[in-house]
Amino acid sequence: MTPSLANYQEREQRVLCHTYGRYPLAVTRASGCKLYDPQGREYLDLLAGIAVCNLGHSHPELLAVMREQAERLIHVSNLFHQDEQLVLAEKLLATCSLDKVFFCNSGAEANEAGIKLARRYMQKVKGRDAYEIISLAGSFHGRTLATLTATGQDKVKDGFAPLPEGFQNIPFGDFPALEQAVSQKTAGILLEIIQGEGGVRPLENSYLLAVQELCRDRGILLMVDEVQTGLGRSGKFWAHEHAAISPDILTTAKALANGLPMGAMLCTAETSQGFVPGSHATTFGGGPLVAAVAARVVDILLRDDFAQRAETIGNIAQGMFRELQALHPGKIVDVRGRGLMLGIELAFPGQEVWRELLESGFVLNLTQDRVLRLLPPLVVTEEDLARFSQALGDILKKK
């Protein structure tokens, strides 16, 4: 007998901590850009596991790597040399100007590693009592105590006091406020090139270049959180390439192993001196199975130029959504984003619109109460997005 949604909900109530506001949908299988519920109904996935499955679901090349690697070696810990980890590191570093990698299991852990490295580099290598990390209002950097403190949203901090000291949030995109906030105790400035959970808000290239110059002038670290924007989603392999900046620390995760838990903190050779054996570690990070899959992910993204595809399809989608904005005056405030990281800001609370889209077979995200956030697999088609745009237009006609 196929279980009902109510059955899933009742069982979860009994056995799981209540930490997620689940969508009214159970998913039992997926392929490409399609999700299927227990009854076999098909949904267009415009969320990709929250920017994770960039290559879509059940990618045949990745499934083959998983099988082959699982038969050879899955886990031995970081006490041993492992070729899979080195191959992945070499491939990742070839895509950017950074020199060293630390592998972990998630975006929060990658940001935690970056924060620890920034502090330890300043104190142990530079001999400076600098430990503060500056980030922006609206940002999201993770759920550990350090990364939720760095996050510029009060809702994720509620009930977790006392929070660690050494963090400061300043207004989004306000360079004078940032410049004023920097002091002798500042170790680094942590930025998302495009805020995701904060409402799909890109930082201007001019702002990013000014921040880089400020970091160089003051001798502090430029830290870029590409957990969501990295690996082709923005129309470049790394979103910071849009502004031609060179971070000292870069963090990534989500799409790195296309669904397996994987994160990485990349840094310059100079900054890497902050870590020595024993100063930071993880049991599972960069294990052979996830590293082998991630290496193939990087190969496929580059081979098939998915960054360029994301830019092309994303521009087409923005055009569709702006047409909707013109057709429904006063209902869409803004259409923004880069590549296939898109936000449609409604002029009113969007929960009802989001729910009607789900009922119509479209899975996406609602953030900041009014922003429909689209993070589809990079294999999504123009036709898929046209169907979504039509459905959204039909819903807006009734509002």
Image (tube, grey):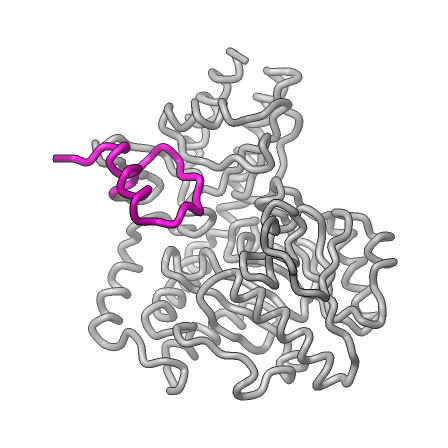
Which quadrant would the C terminus be assigned to in this image?
top right
* Residue found 51% across the figure and 60% down from its top: 107
Residue 378 visible in the displayed image: no
* Residue found 49% across the figure and 79% down from its top: 281
* Residue found 56% across the figure and 27% down from its top: 321
In depth, the one of 130 and 231 nearer the eye is 130
Residue 98 placement: quadrant: bottom right
* Residue found 61% across the figure and 40% down from its top: 199
Above or below 388: residue 177 = below
Membership of 48 in magenta stretch:
no
Residue furthest top in the image:
398
Q: Is residue 395 left or right of residue 59?
A: right
Magenta range is: 1-28
Q: Is residue 366 left or right of residue 336?
A: left
Residue 285 placement: quadrant: bottom left
Above or below 39: residue 101 = below
In depth, the one of 298 and 152 nearer the eye is 152
Q: Position of residue 208 (x, y in %)?
A: 74, 56
Residue furthest left in the image:
1
Residue 370 placement: quadrant: top right
Q: Position of residue 193 (x, y in %)?
A: 65, 53
Above or below 279: residue 7 = above
Which quadrant would the N terminus be assigned to in this image?
top left
- Most common secondary structure along the magenta stretch: loop
Q: Position of residue 348 (x, y in %)?
A: 61, 22
In depth, the one of 133 and 212 nearer the eye is 133
Membership of 22 in magenta stretch:
yes
Q: Position of residue 56 (x, y in %)?
A: 36, 48
Q: Is residue 230 left or right of residue 294?
A: right
